[in-house]
Image: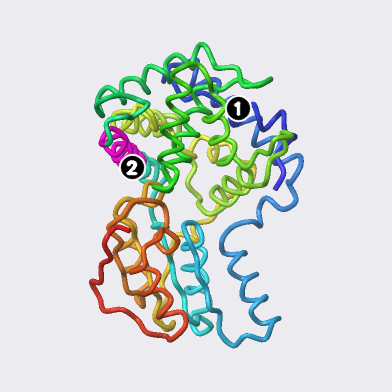
Amino acid sequence: MRCGDGAEMDRFTSLNTLPADAQTHQAAEAANKEFAALCQEHSGKILPYVGTVNAARDMDRIREAVGDPKLNYVGMSYGTQLGGVYATLFPKNVGRMVLDAPLDPTVTFEQRTLAQTRGFQQAYESFLKACVKEGSCAVGKTPEEANANVARLMNQLTTKPLQVGGRALTQGLASTGVAAALYSELTWPFLEQALGEALKGRGEALMYLADSYTGRDQNGNYSTQMTSFPAITCVDTAERPDEATLRRTEAAALKISPLFGSEGSGGLCRVWPAKGSDEARHVDATGSAPILVVGGKGDPATPYQWAPKLTAQLKTATLVTYEGEGHGAYLSGSKCVQGIVDAYLIDGKMPQKGTTCPAA
């Protein structure tokens, strides 16, 4: 998936989400239309075919080609939807399947945006509490003071971006950088450093975090991370929200979190040049081997509420709950989760229903 060159991608990724006024909305709509047109221009031939249903079919062709009677699979985040769709299409071909940090494929754009906004806000508040606990937090002395300092920084960046080399750290990029560091508790110390430096007028570290999320290298070239995600998302649903839905979604998200609230990906899918289908939103793995689902209570990107929902939809799944922070539990450092997953993958031993693991 290609949607323009590095300079065009820079314009798209640096877009501000604040203030939530008519000017910001017009800029977002214009950017979405330009991005969608560039995707059509550079990758139009494949746009209709990059959805999860086709990817699952591809996986089964690969399984067959390498001579495996069953597909053993570990999927994380979006990989849980891919695994769920595979198990729905090819239940008899499922071997040992683990779905970590699960998505609920039935959610609407509005539901997904609000749930993820809550998830990131919850992780952000946990970060602030952890930061001030030691008494030397670079962002503020109390969670309230630290939050106010970050809010002030973001508001300043909407009109006066920080110069980083020949680039500008906008509010949009800074928010992306903060969100990127909340995916794992291991990056919280670097987030503290990045915010502390930005409050003093240096934006290099926050820019680095934003680039790590968007897949931009030092030469200004992008991976296909930022182009593949919307292409798959928009083909995986027939939903095309209207303007009123986008504004309602944004207003509700901003009440939850001024830092992470936005209209979500609905605005881009609204102008997407390829039609969508709801086939990937319905999963039912009846007839498959047992599937292990792992959901984290402190996961910002795939909130825990989605884990029991996907487990129920699959019919053949068992849920393990991880009590810790971060996106994805298997690689979080939890020996409990790792032990359970490895026991299933290697020995075929499923945990008991209701199993929980403490925070690492």
Magenta residue span: 119-133
Q: Is residue 134 shown above or below 331? A: above
Q: Return the x and y of residue 42 as percentages of the image width and height.
A: 76, 42
The residue beneath circle 1 is 31
Task: Count residues near mark 1 (Cα–Cα under 10 Å), then give few for <14, some for 14-19, many for 20+.
Answer: some
Q: Is residue 162 left or right of residue 199?
A: right
Q: Viewed as shown, does residue 352 lie left or right of 350?
A: left
Q: Which residue is mark 2?
A: 123
Q: Quadrant of residue 15?
A: top right
Q: Is residue 246 above or below residue 356?
A: above
At numbered mark 1, what does the secondary structure look like: helix, strand or loop? helix
In the depicted view, which residue is nearer to us: 201 or 230?
201
Question: Is residue 128 highlighted in magenta?
Answer: yes
Label 2 environment density (alpha carbons within 10 Å; few <14, some 14–19, many ≥20): many
How far from the left and from the top, in percent, is residue 319?
A: 31, 69
- Label 2 SS: helix
Instruction: State the residue at coordinates (57%, 45%).
Output: 230
* C-alpha span from label 2 to label 1: 29 Å
Residue drawn 62% across the image and 85% down it: 68
| Image quarter (top left, top right, bottom left or bottom right) of the C terminus | bottom left
Q: Is residue 120 visible?
A: yes
Specify the label residue 129 is tagged with: none
Q: Is residue 249 above or below residue 315?
A: above
Q: Amino acid at mark 1?
A: Ala
Say if the magenta span includes residue 264.
Answer: no
Displayed quadrant of residue 13: top right
- To which quarter of the image does residue 336 belong? bottom left
Q: Residue at x 71, y 81 (%)?
A: 65
Residue 171: x, y in percent?
A: 49, 23
